[in-house]
Structures are given as structure tokens and as C-alpha cells.
Amino acid sequence: MMTISTAHLRALYLLSGTAMALLATGPAWAAPAGPETVKPADPVPAPSPDQDRSANQDKDRIERQDDDIVVNGRRHAVQDTQNAQIRSSSLVSIISGEELRAQPQQNLADLLTRLPGVNSSVDQSRNAAATGEAQYLSIRGLDTAYNAYMLDGVRLAQTDARTRAISMNLLSPFSIAEARVNKAPTANFDGDAIAGVIDLRTASAFNLPAGHVQIRAQGQVAGRAAARGQNPWGGTAQIETAQRLGNLGIYASVYYGLKHTLGESTAMQHDWEKYDNKIPGMIRDNLDNIAPRGVQWNVFRNRIERLGGTLNLDWKGEDLDLYSYTTYGRYKLKSWMDQTALRQTDLAPGQINPNPGNTGSYDAAGFRADYGLTATHYFRTEHSNQELFSTKFGGQSRLGDLTLDYHAAYSRGEQDYPLRVQSGFAGKPYIGTADNSGLAITRMVTSIGDRTSPQVVLTDAARAALLNLSTLKQWYVTQQFENTWERRLEGQLDATWKLADQGLEAIAAGAKVEGTKRYANSLGDDGALQYFFPLANGSNAPRYNAQGPSVADIPGEMLGGFMHNSAQVPIKLLDTKFIEDQIRRLSTPKLAGLNPVKLKENRLDGKEQRIGAYAMATFRTGDLTVIPGVRFEHNRFEGTYWQSNEKTGNGFVTTARSYNQWLPSVIASYRPNDRVVYRASVRRSYSRPAFDLLLGPTEVSLSDDGTLSVFIPNPNLDAQTAWNVDASVELKGEGTDFFSISPYYKRINHVLFSTGTTNAGGDLNVWGTSSPIKVNGVETSTLDTSGKGDVYGIELVGRYSFRDLPGLFDGLGVGGNITLQRAQAKVFVNGQWRGQRMPQAPRLMYNVELFYNHGGFQAALNYNYTGDKLYDLRSSRPDTYIQPVSKMNLMLGYTLGKHVAIGASIENLLNAHTYWATTSQRQAYLSNDRKGGYIETGRVYSLNLSYSF
């Protein structure tokens, strides 16, 4: 049963009350946006109303905008997107660039969650959640591999090293004219879109006023950074212009943004373990019998830089249109993490474990007893650089009743982790004896009374011994690096033949050829370039007797406060230049003597080709339109990677495979008038497995309990396939009023439980055959795709402006959407079939917004909620879940005549957490560090100014 809890209702009441209070005091300004419209949609078999706009309609739209102040232009933009949704051939959700830029965020993954059923996610294994920004975007929360991502009709290059996830970090709302989420695409779209297509479109000079020039500027302050005495400043500047020279239209836009944020988190230091070891079964079988093992506290300093631009050329003739669309984006993150912890480590010589046999972690009665309580400091960087270049050349030829659309495109994406630094600091474990030697008497006990601020129980003596930073000595420094890039070439030809106005109205056919080259490599071994500070005899110092400088001696500054005041070990923000200098002097020289295999063992050179062809027809009888179609796609992939083999020797091996997909579809719509549409569709789609599941070296790992496991990628994996059923009723009211209801169902075969996040490879979350294969006497697992899943749900959308309100209350309205769904699958895990929620798919998502437009004033208060979701599927241990996340944003604005708009906004008004991962679905069991823990990044305050010439 799908319900909304009282907590959700309280949030809605708070939203309403806050908005009324703001209106009573007089609103003042939302982030400004220029009067943009959208480019015509890509062609479908018959010219539908959203594509068949006459030149006079475009002219009227532009002239009307040129005479209106910006607030009216924004209202018209909302009306235009609603009209486009009603007229579209399939079920789409559309948001205009004006609406996107009115929000305080600049990250598209955050911005697009305002659309119904669109969900964002983030990967904290690389500290990304601590930036306060999301990374990934998916429709209805389904894995990113189930989504197709397009920019101006070109598939975006994939830059993730291990999955098909596409990071939205480097895409900016500047120059985006509209974003379309197509949840039931017709056969002329790529077929690998079980969830649907996320289609971003940039602006055209022919959809803007002639001679248009606009400058936008924004200043930002990160509240959490300011409160901690760190750099809180940020800002963005953008300029765009649209010029028309006869038949030629030129649109150009450039932007630059820089901001600083500070994130804070608390997490468990290790995985949870059994408390009473006598109770049989797996750890996951009894959640009342698990014990924590220490706590850590993290501070993340972030510097985010964005740079990009768009250049679009359009030439419009009587029977021929030509265009060139080019976009470049760069995202550069510098992320420094300082972590303190109270944890269990190995005892030093002279310290004796009192457990049976003087070893292990359980006492004679079988209860958990951890000895070796140690304070530590840990420093890590997660700097990353991302780039995307996309260009498309094409045109449209109109030959009587025949229309030809054609294009060639190239895109290249790159993601680089140039310097991943790590350094550890530790002291001698505390065991509770007078001289800290002999038989240990103090065990580590962790209290979880506060579920987001767990504490290690300390005596006064333990506190005095552990919390002195001069006793935490540097143990090691090391570095890693990683690089991934992909380049894509594609060409497409579509032909549409208009036959009549009724009956068989049109037929269409087309073909697309796509080729992709991919490269990924990394030095992923923590120890490959690791430098240990030596003992006097030259040997590597152990953790309990580290020999480097102490935390107290290294340059830096003490953190002025911490989330919930829960950090038990003082946190010092180390001087980043000092650590980087150590890396240059101590770690980098080891590169010369590195085993060359280390630079090859993670390399993957991949190629992927796809040929697609489709045929569609449009039948129209009165108000009913039916579009049957069929698409065929031929896929081939090839990968070359380094493989170690004791019998044949080490070397590069190549694996290749090809497969075909037939994808029929039928989409019907009934329009009794121009304000109402009823839709129904049935289509078949598929999803290609990620490269790391198909290709790559055998992976060998040793678990904490000493179990050796070997994973071999499986190039014979079946593509995931699905039958999709969608329906909707959409109603356009007066002004910007709009209502819709959309139920849906998906039956998925060959399910893979892979999570589409950076370097969280699917092989970590998927288990295959019931009988492990024996390879050289070692039990070895690979993957199969025999699982089946079901996704069903319903989306409700509404927007309403109150009318005939008195005085200042005139202009008040409310809007929102809610998605309720279930996404379940059966997969084979740890020797049994298990019914599971599908990863990253929440059961509840909703947005609520109160908006106000009166004269030149604008205000909006919106609240976004995403319910809990499965993060990863584990075998013997409890699965990891992401707890619900919510965010409230406030925007105020005022327009001065036709040219100037000013405003202010607050992001995360309620200062809510940005991420909360738990071991199991219970909120009481905080996750360990690499799964994320509990993270807060605070509020962000913005001031905005735009000027239109």
C-alpha cells in the first residue's frame, strides 16, 4: 500500500505557512532568467503540433516577449512547455530554461528533480555527496543504464570508468532552452531506454528576440563554510546573445562559475559485526544482534569550478534548413577531506589481547570484545576534472510531401582523477593499563543512542591518552590516479512522407549508425606508490609506532566547530600544500621503480558499434492518433584488457560479441480538444550491460574472514529487456493551470542489480550462478542474467493559480507532483533467490511549490522529497540503504522595467542533511565511511542580477 506519512504532511504544512508569511511581508525576487523559448522538436513520423509552428507564430511569440517584462516572459514559457506537452506525440515532461534558471542551484541533476518522477543520486565513495550537489539523474529512480541521455539530439559520451552512468556535473542550465523527459519514446529514438530519454536542448537565435543580449551575474555564500571560518564565496557570470542576419541565426553563450562549500559527516568506522557469535546464521538474518566498531568524523573542503559555452548556427530557407550546434563544458573539483576517528587497530608489541588464545574479537562467552582502541587522523583528496564536447551538423530538406532530416555528430567526454592523495596518522592503541602494556582491560564500546551522532565510550584516562594531537604521528603518504575518456561518432537519416490528413496520415523510416571508442586506466593500488615513514633501522614503521610528523606539528588550522558538536577527536584541517609537497618528494619518486604491470592491469580499451533502423506510421481518425512502429538495433562490442594467467603468462587479451534487438511499439493519443489528451502506449526496450560486467581482468579479493573470492566478467550477459506500458490523462487549464495522472508498468527480464554510480561496479552488487565454477581449484563466480523484475507506479501532476484574491494576494498559486511506485526483482544471491527492491528506485518522490507573481514581484518556495532507496545489495551482510532526503528552496525576485531583474535565494532553507546511508533499512544503524554515513552541507545564499539589452 502506498501512503504519505504524517512527517510528509507536516513538511507541506510548514511550506504553506512559510509562504504565507513571506507574502504578508512583501516578496522580493527570484533568480532572473531571460525570455527564451525552445527549438522545434526532433521530427516524428507526422508533423505534430509541437513541431508544426509557423513562422508567424514564432514571430508573434518573440514580439510579445520583447514587449513584456521578464516575469511575463517566464509565465509564457510555462504556458509554452505545457502546450508542447499536450501536443507531443508521446508522454513527456518539459521544463523551460527560464524555469531552470529561476532556481538557486546550478547543477542540472538537482534542478531537474522538479520534474515528475525524476530522481537524482550521488556517489559518496569519491566524497561527491559532501559537495552539496547531486551527480546522476534518472527517470523514476531506475538505474542510469536504463536511461538515454541526449544533448541537442546527440547521445552524451560516457566517462565513467566502470558503468554507463553519466555525470551531470559539467552541464549547466545556462543556454539550455528546455529539458524534455520522454517516458514513452517512439521508435525513432534509441531503443536502450527502459526508463526513457532525458533530452536537453540548447537555444536558437530564431526563438529569441532579434539583437538579444543578456548578462547574468550571481554571488554566493555557503553558510556552513562561513560558520566554520572557511572560504564561503562563490559566483557565476554568463553572457549570451542571439543575432539574425537574414536567413542566418547565431546564438552564443559563455559562462564561468566558482564556488566553495564545506561538508561535514559522521560515519561508522567499520562494517557492523555480530554481537553474540553463538547465534547462528548470517549477520543480515538478525539485525538485533549486530555491534558497531568505532566512529569517524569527516570535514570536506570543496572548490568547484565550471566553465563552458555554446555556439549554435541556424540557416532557414524556403525548402532547406541547415544548422550547427556545438557545446563545451568543463567541471573541475578540488576536494580535501580531513578525518578523525576512534577505531580498533592491531595491538602493539607488549599489549596482550585477553580473548581466548590471545586473538580474535570474541570473549570466552562468545560476545564481541574489541581491544586496541586508537585515535587516528586521515587525509584524502578526491580532485576530479571532467570535460564534454559535443557538436552536431545537419539539416532538413522539404521536398513536397517528403521531408528529410539528417545529421552527423561527434562528442567526446573525459573524466580524470589526476592526484588522489592519502595520508594516515595514528598512535599507540589504548588498553587501559597503567603503563599501556600487558593484558588489555579496556575494550572499545560504541554507543548508538543518537542515530546520526554515535559516540565511543571513553573514560577520563582514555580521553587524556587518545585526544592529544601531538601523539598522532604520520604513518604513510600515497597517491593514485585514474583517467577515462570516450568519443562517439554518429550519423542519422530520417524520412517522413505526408500522405493525408485522415486515415494513414504519414509514414516514416530512418537509420542511425553509431561508433564509440573508449579508454579507461587507473593506478588503483593504494600501496603501489606508498611511502612509509621509516624506523631508525630503515624499515617501514608500523601503525602503532608511526615515525612521521605529528598532526600538531603539521601546518594547518583547527576547525571551529563541527556538526552536532559530536567530533570526539579534535579536527585539524591540514595544510594541503604541505601534504602535496610530501607526495612530490616521497611518493612520486617511487613511480620510476614501479612494476610496469601496475600501469596495465586496470587498462581497458573498448569499442562499441550500433546500427539502428526503424519504420513508423501515423494513423489519424477524428481525434484519435495511433503510431505503430518497430525498431531494430544491432550491437557489437569489443574490449582489450590486461589479464594475468599463471599458465599462459600475462598479457592483453581481446573479447568481442554482437547481439540484436527487435523493439516494437504502439503509441495512441486521443484529443477531444486542444486542452485535453488521453494517452496509452506499449513498447519494448532494452539496456546494455556496463563494460565492467562484460569485459576486464579477473578480480581477486580476500574478505575479512579470510574467504578468497574471484570474479570473472561475462561477455555473454544478456541485455536487460522490458515491456513497458504507459498511460496518461493530461488537462491544460486557464493560464498556467495544468493537471495530469500517469500510471505505468514495466516487466523487466535479465535483471542486473548494478548501481550506476562512479566506480561502483555492478560486480559488487550482483551474484550469478548457483554453482560456482572451479578455476585452478578456487571457487570462482561470474554473472548471469536470469532475474526478473516488475516496476509499477503512478505519477500525479498539478498546478493551479488562485483567482480573484484581494490586493497583494493576487498572483498566488500552488503546484507539485508526486510519484508512487514499486520496483522489485528476484535475483540469486548467496545460494538463494531473493526478492529485492531495485537499486536507487525510491517508492515515494514528490515536489510542492507555492509561487507568487504580482506586478514585477516574483516569489517561490519549493520543497523536494525523495524517499528511501536501496544503495547496494550484499550477500551475508545487511544491504545498504539511503534514507529519505528533502530540500526546501526559497526564491524572491523583482523586475525593473524590461531590462533589469534582481533577486535573492536560499538553497536548503531548512538546513537538512544532504545524504544519509544506513546499514539495513533501519535508521539506527549508520553506514560505514565508504558508503557515506550522515552528511550535512548547510545552506547556500545567492544574490542575482541580470540585464537584457
Image: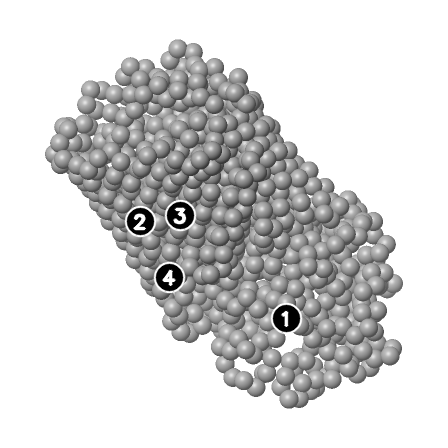
The residue depicted at 46 percent of the width and 56 percent of the height is 9
Mark linked to residue 729: none
Mark 4–mark 2 Cα distance, whole angstroms, equals: 16 Å
Please name the residue that numbered disc 4 is placed on.
Answer: 2
Which numbered disc, 3 or 4, marks the residue that appears first in the sequence? 4
Q: Residue 8 in the image: x percent, y percent?
A: 47, 57
Mark 3–mark 2 Cα distance, whole angstroms, equals: 11 Å
SS at circle 4:
loop
Please name the residue that numbered disc 3 is placed on.
Answer: 817
Q: Residues within 10 Å of mark 4 (few under 14, many from 20)?
A: few
Q: Is residue 673 above or below residue 211?
A: below
Mark linked to residue 742: 2
Mark closer to the observer (1, 4): 4
Q: Residue 330 in the image: x percent, y percent?
A: 57, 35
Q: Is residue 781 left or right of residue 317?
A: right
Please name the residue that numbered disc 1 is placed on.
Answer: 448
Which numbered disc, 1 or 4, marks the residue that appears first in the sequence? 4
Q: Is residue 671 above or below residue 897?
A: below
Q: Amino acid at mark 2?
A: Ser
Q: Residues within 10 Å of mark 2 (few under 14, many from 20)?
A: some
Quick one: 758 or 138, which is closer to the camera? 138
Which numbered disc, 1 or 2, marks the residue that appears first in the sequence? 1
Mark 1–mark 2 Cα distance, whole angstroms, equals: 42 Å
Q: Is residue 711 above or below residue 360?
A: above
Q: Residue 438 in the image: x percent, y percent?
A: 82, 82
